Image (tube, rainbow, N blue to C red):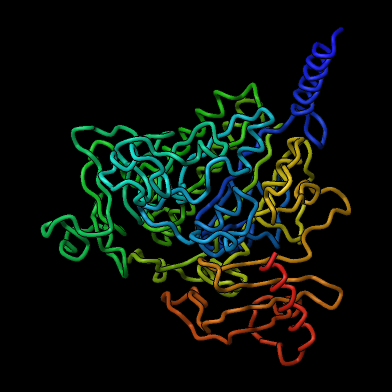
Amino acid sequence: MTAASGRVFIAVVVGLFLSTYAMVSSYGGDQPNIIVIMADDLGYGDLSCYGATTIQTPNIDRLAASGIRFTSGYCSASTCTPTRYSFLTGKYAFRTPGTGVAPPNGPAIIEPNTVTIASLLKDVGYQTKVVGKWHLGLGPRQSETKQTAEKSNASEGARMIGPDWNGELKPGPLEIGFDSCYLLPTTNDRVPQVYVADHHVENLDPSDPLWVGDKKPSDDHPTGETARGSLKMDWSHGHNQTIHNGISRIGFYTGGHAARFLDEDLASRWVDKSIEFIQTNRERPFFLFFASHDIHVPRVTHPYFSGLSKMGPRGDSILQLDWCVGELMNMVEKMGLTKKTLFVFVSDNGPVMDDGYKDEALEKLGEHRAAGPLKGGKYSVYEGGTRTPFLVSWPSVVTPAVSDEMVTTVDLARSCARIAGTMVPEGACPDSLDLSAVLLGKPEAKGRDHVLQQNNNGNQFGLRVREESGDWKLIEAPNGQMHNVKIEETLRSTKIPKQQLFDLKADPGETTDVAGQHPDVMERLKNRLAEIKSQ
């Protein structure tokens, strides 16, 4: 055997070894299918398995009963875009400028070829798909060639921000590890109301091009202000621009009529596309990111759920979300995949009542407390803003339990990679911890000793630290204001101290600032937060 042929032989053997290794989970047996279900604006107290009594969620409760229900499970931010960024990349969003809530025409926030949970799993044989709400931008940040600039009617070198709605929508999910996608491109209170299948708007008629902008296209363009009487759901603040399906949105668009969807069809379309993916890939490992739009505004459900909860559209949306979870679980069971499928159920941030539409969320709230015993909700870094339902089920591996170990969505990238039997490249997923043993309920496994929480743009932080001296929470709000502190009231900004300290063991509702009584703890946590931010 020559030296060259020997090198080829060794390369082939190593390749076969790695291929075989990739098909084995770190926890024994074949690699599990992985389904991550991310709810939208769902609070800690919104599910019956977390104590809700005015609404019942039997399918999500069934998922909880089959696995681990975490009572200290967190998303990484109190709004959707930064949490989704951190979940996929394993990196805190505040480290990357421009990761706040993405506008309708926003470019792709995650750069092509970034290591993500999807790319890690794809590299070891998984089929990967995202279905549902994206809200991480589409398209390039700037024109890179003269040809691209000319195509966009821009000068050479000029910035070409965001998506080409009538052409190829890339970069996007397919450039960061997903084999396919079926998306709501932004979020449904923002325009446009179209589906994106892989790189194109679905059903778009070239003779009726889609235009999306941030300025009114013409003086006679109907909006939520000029045609308010025509709306089937009135707006309360901000959501008063282009009207579609009787609902005014944030932003403006025209054209693309054949491609537009009805709000009432979203949930069932997500389920249909997900079931199709599960059926197609039942013989091989798959990763499905099911990004629900429920229970985000505008809360418009399928007619079956309308009025079902007796709590208005917000309650109806919770029931619709529960139905979606049940349909996915039922299909996995029907395909005989229950024992080899890992389910993770989380929310992208905490709850909010009136978030721009008059949908009776406050009026029909009754005794329901969306954040349970926690303070604050969406937009805030109090516990209610980022501590949410967090469930893990893998019936052949996970023993049903309730755990108070601290886990976060930013850890799913490294943890799922470990479960699938692969390693994370050096420098990738820098803030993600391997908590796979905790997620799977292994004896003596320990969760995080700290949890970092950020608001939308990363200018406010919460830091929860568990140490021998106690379970402490630092709040840092340099501007002295915080949104949605009391979620049972109309959304508003509340004046708060710029720094606060809470003893969560004695005061889980964050009612009493103890910074004056524990200056040493305050200083220690401030230094710890500064260290994390500077890493």
At 61% from the left edge and 31% from the top edge, which residue is drawn? Answer: 332
Residue 171 versus residue 400: which sits nearer the camera?
171
Residue 10 versus residue 65: which sits nearer the camera?
10
> Residue placed farthest to the top in the image?
1
Q: Position of residue 335 (x, y in %)?
A: 61, 25
At 31% from the left edge and 44% from the top edge, which residue is drawn? Answer: 262
Residue 296 versus residue 369: which sits nearer the camera?
296
**Left or right of residue 345, residue 263 in this image:** left
Image quadrant where one finds the C terminus: bottom right
As displayed, is residue 292 above or below residue 480? above
Image quadrant where one finds the N terminus: top right
**Left or right of residue 322, residue 208 in this image:** left
Q: Position of residue 343 (x, y in %)?
A: 65, 42
Q: Position of residue 278 (x, y in %)?
A: 56, 29
Q: Position of residue 429 (x, y in %)?
A: 67, 50
**Left or right of residue 445, residue 119 in this image:** left
Residue 19 versus residue 395: which sits nearer the camera?
19
Q: Is residue 200 visible?
A: yes
Q: Is residue 53 visible?
A: no
As displayed, is residue 254 above or below residue 368? above
